Structures are given as C-alpha cells and as structure tokens.
Image: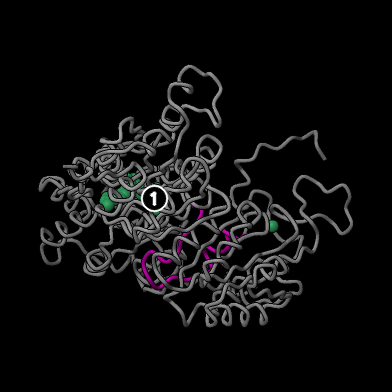
Amino acid sequence: MDSQPTAMTDGLHLVADALKINGIDTVYGVIGIPVTDLARVIQEDGIRFYGFRHEQSAGNAAAIAGFLTQKPGICMTVSAPGFLNGLVALANATTNCFPMVLISGSSERHIVDLEQGDFEEMDQMAAAKSFAKASYRVNRIEDIGVGIARAIHAACAGRPGGVYLDLPAAVLGSVLELGVAKKSLIKAVEPSPASIPSAESVTRALNLLSKAEKPLILLGKGAAYAQADKDIRAFVEKTGIPYLPMSMAKGLLPDDHPQSAAAARSFVLKNADVVMLVGARLNWLLSHGKPPTWNPDTRFIQVDIAAHEIDSNRPIEAPVVADIKSAMAAFLAAMKPGQVKASAAWVGAVTEQKQKNVEKMAARLNADPTPMNFSSALRAVRNALASRPDVYVVNDGANTLDFGRNILDMKEPRHRLDSGTWGAMGINMGYSIGAAVVSNKPVVVIAGDSAFGFCGMEIETICRYKLPVTTVIFNNNGIYRGDKPDTFPPTPTGLYQNARYDKMIEAFGGVGVHVERSADLQKAVSDGIASGKPTLINAAIDPTAGTESGHITNLNPKSTLVS
Ligand code: ADP
Ligand code: MG
C-alpha cells in the first residue's frame, strides 16, 4: 500500500509565512533574479506588494512606513546592484532611526565566497554591516523563521534602524517538510519593548527644570516616532514652557500653538538656560549645541532611548534614558502641581521676539512677484493645505526644503516628512508612496527640480497604483538655481531650461499642470488633493531665486580661483 506523500513547502513560501505571522502586510521592492517568485508568492499570500522602478525609492518607502507605523518597513531587492541601490535607503533609515528591513536575494554562496565570478556576485551581508544596525544571512531553509524574527527585533528594539537580511537563491529554492517548516516560524513578541526611566533620572530632570529661568523644550523626530502625542502636549501645556519642534516634529503640537517658539528659533537657542531635548540629537541640524548659536552656559536634560547618545556633543546634566512614551508618562506622574512653571517674563520675551520675526517675514511672504520665488510659491501651497491638516507633506530639495520648513505649518503629528538627519536628496517619491500606502490619505510632495530628478521615474509607480499623490516641482531650472537663458554648455548647477515636468506624468495617465502664478499654483494643489488622482504640478520659479547650498552655504568649500 502506498503511503501518503509528505506535504512539503519551499523557502519562498516560508519567507511569506514568516512575514505574515509577524503582522507584515506590505512589501516594497523591485523584482528580478532570485526574488521574482518571492514577490508573487508574497502577493498570493495576501501581503501587498508595491513594485518600484528603483530600489532606493522602494527602500525609502519602506523606511518612512516604518517611521509612521512603528513596524519595520520591508524592502525587497535582487542581488548585488539591486541590493546596493537599496543600501542607500537602508543607511538613511539607520541614520534617521527608522525601523526597516532590507531583504535581498543573493547568488551562489560557494561561488561568491571563492570569488569565482557568479551572476551579480557580492558578499552582501559583509557589505551591509557598516550601513545597518545589524546584518544577517540565512544559510538553511529551516532558519528562515529565525532570520525574519531576528531582523524584526533588531530593527525595532531600542533606537530603531535599518537591518539587512540576506537570502541566498539556494535557500529560497530549498524544500522542507511542511510540519517542520511550520514549527520553524517565530512570531517576534514585543519587538519594541518599553524602556522605563529610573525614578532618579526623572527626579533629577524635574529638579533641573524647576530651577530654570528660561527653559526650553526641544522636540525631535524621536518624539514624533514615539506616538506619545497626548502626554507630550500635556507636559508642554502644564509647564507652560516654550517648545521648539525640529522639522519632522512639527505638528506634534499644532504650529499655531501659543507656546511654539519656532518663529523665535535663534532667540531661544541663544537665551535658554535649561534645554530639555526630547528625541532630538545635538547634531549639525542643531549646530552641535555649540556657541555662537547656543548659550555656552546652557544646561541640558536629554530624553532618549539610546544611552550612548548622551554627552555626544555637550555635557548632559540630566539624562533620562527611556522610551519617550514611558518618560513623558513618568514626568507627568512625578511632577508636583506648580513644580515646573515657565516664568511670565521669559514667555513674554519669547512671544515678543516671535511677533517681531513674523512681522519681518510678512513682507517677503506676502509679496507676489512674477516669476514666483520660493516664498510666494510656498505661500500658495500653504494656503491650499490650510483646510486639509490630514494631508501628508513630503518636502525635499535645498532651498525648497529650507524655506518649506519655515513656511509650511503643520497641525497633525507625523505629517511632515523630509530629508532628515542626512539632508538626503531624492527621498520625495519613496516617502510619498510609503505615506500614501500606510495612511490612505492624500500626500503633497514639494520638491525642487533637482531633488525630483533623483527619483522622478517613480511617478509611473504612483500612477500604476493610482495613489493620491500631488507632486509640486519647484522648477528653477537648476540645482540651487538656474543658468542665464541660453547658457551652453550648461554650468554644473544648471538643469534643462524651462523643462515641462508636468508632461512626464501625462505619459502614464496622470494629471499634469503647468503654473507660473501663485494663485494658479494654490488652485492646482487644492484640485490635486480634492481629485485624489496622481497629479504633477510644474511650478515655474525664478531661475535666479535660490542660494547655492541653501541655508548651509558655510559647509561648501569655495575656491577663490574659480569665477
Ligand atoms: P531630529 O532630527 O528631529 O532632531 P534626531 O533624529 O536627531 O531628531 O533624534 C531622534 C532621537 O530620538 C534619536 O537619538 C533616537 O535615539 C531617539 N528615539 C527614537 N525613538 C525613540 C523612542 N521611542 N523613545 C525615545 N527616544 C527615541
Ligand atoms: Mg532647482
């Protein structure tokens, strides 16, 4: 008598099962050898697969999905070149503290390791190590479950970051008995465990804050990631302390909140005597906490999940090593009524400075020049967004980013997504797709023509998946600024003059609009949001508008010998 054939499974199905059991519902990637069938199996298994045109954008979509959901975003690529394209996004995710897993297929191990010359040969696991929080390889089909679980834990635990997981073709193609395979799967339990602050650190921080005469709370994107919005707002409002949001922390409290010191940024950084950093690093974006931007006598509290971040740039008198959700709850519980209260004199001084700066900015912001400049175009976008606080804003570029940070107001947490810690250009299409996919909400991209160029082909991806993304290109004919008319050959900063990027999207059935006036831009953005259709607005900006290197010209070495 014939015995029943043993039920078998393969590596491809096991990867899909391992992702599913861990609640992963979306994968972003580009298919090819050896992951084409993996994407197919994943899709058949009910996981959404978003296919991109370039792995960097797929990785950026995964990374921003990780930031928005606290679940690692998954990017899938082919071997060597595809892997390397994705690696930029993985490194960017690690730098920005976004949880992400890059899964790449790889070639034959025995050939790669002896450098015998395989198709897309590369030791990807070793290559990824210096750019990721962790880098693993699965060498046996029965270890797929362990590999996925470890990758998820590593991406989410403590300070989040990017993790690489190498899946050799041979492992994907292997077979295993179904019963054994099922048992090999692992559901990662509590991959982002709470990190409770010590009572001592909480007391120390509150004591220092209560002695301050000019306190300041500085909110960073770690605070946005933590999803502790209610407690952060309660703490800010109970203490009455002015707060300054870093760009991706805008909207944690609405930008028009009376305690926002955003319009008096230089003033508060220079004058505050005690600064409480909440999920923000004292890196280049904060002038490393050093004079002349900062007061040399400022005393610091730092709330951060990464203990090794403490004292990285300035001495931290009161470190609170914890996750921000636990830390804010602990502060609120431990704070005695009236213990910490910003003085009326300090609050008044900040408010006065704010008013002065707002008045100074008003003239520039209300002007309506032809052609448009960065300020007048951003005002138009701001007006279009005013009635739609639910819209996600992705901001990328140099001048477009610098001006956008100040001009675009946010009302909701985690709705502003931008170049972040590296100042990376070209995140715009990937971030917009990731945000649209996880939120189901409209997204407006505001990107310079140069920033769009790094990833513009993904406009096809947006059209193919019918995503509600309105892309506004601030087109000033160049990187930083454009050349004089008819300059040939173009200078290193010049791009094609008067390009019509709006025509690109029409090739894929999307809506293209060309605008030259701010009123038309405002209408086009409103229409794009309302339609929910993929839209690309080519906004012609004065080619002479824009500063070389934006607001960080000081970082760009200049030759005195070049005219
Ligand atoms: P920004 O650029 O907005 O100033 P950074 O990216 O420099 O913000 O800093 C974010 C900080 O937040 C990092 O030091 C990171 O360790 C920390 N962080 C991330 N997630 C959490 C969390 N859940 N709880 C506490 N700190 C966190
Ligand atoms: Mg430009």
Which quarter shows the C terminus? top right
Tell me the element at label 1. strand
Instruction: Give the residue type at disc 1.
Output: Ile
The foreground one among 342 and 374 is 374
Q: Is residue 40 left or right of residue 361?
A: left
Tell me where residue 119 sits by quadrant. Answer: top right
Tell me residue 413's x, y (percent). 36, 67
Q: Is residue 274 visible?
A: no
Please tell me which residue is depicted at 53% across the width and 82% down the height of the picture.
530
Image position of 89 with respect to 61: above or below: above
Residue identified by numbered label 1: 74
Please tell me which residue is depicted at 23% across the width and 40% down the height of the picture.
177
Please tell me which residue is depicted at 35% across the width and 48% down the height of the picture.
99
Q: Is residue 531 visible?
A: yes
Which quarter shows the N terminus? top left
What color scheme is it?
one colour
Tell me where residue 314 sits by quadrant. Answer: top left
Q: Which residues are magenta?
A: 400-419
In the rendered image, residue 251 lying in the magenta stretch gets the answer no
The foreground one among 507 and 163 is 507
Image position of 246 with respect to 338: above or below: above
Tell me residue 383's x, y (percent). 55, 79
Tell me residue 50's x, y (percent). 47, 58
The foreground one among 211 and 237 is 237
Residue at the top extreme, as displayed: 114
Q: Sort mark 1 into few (<14), some (14-19) or many (20+) by Cα contacts within 10 Å.
A: many
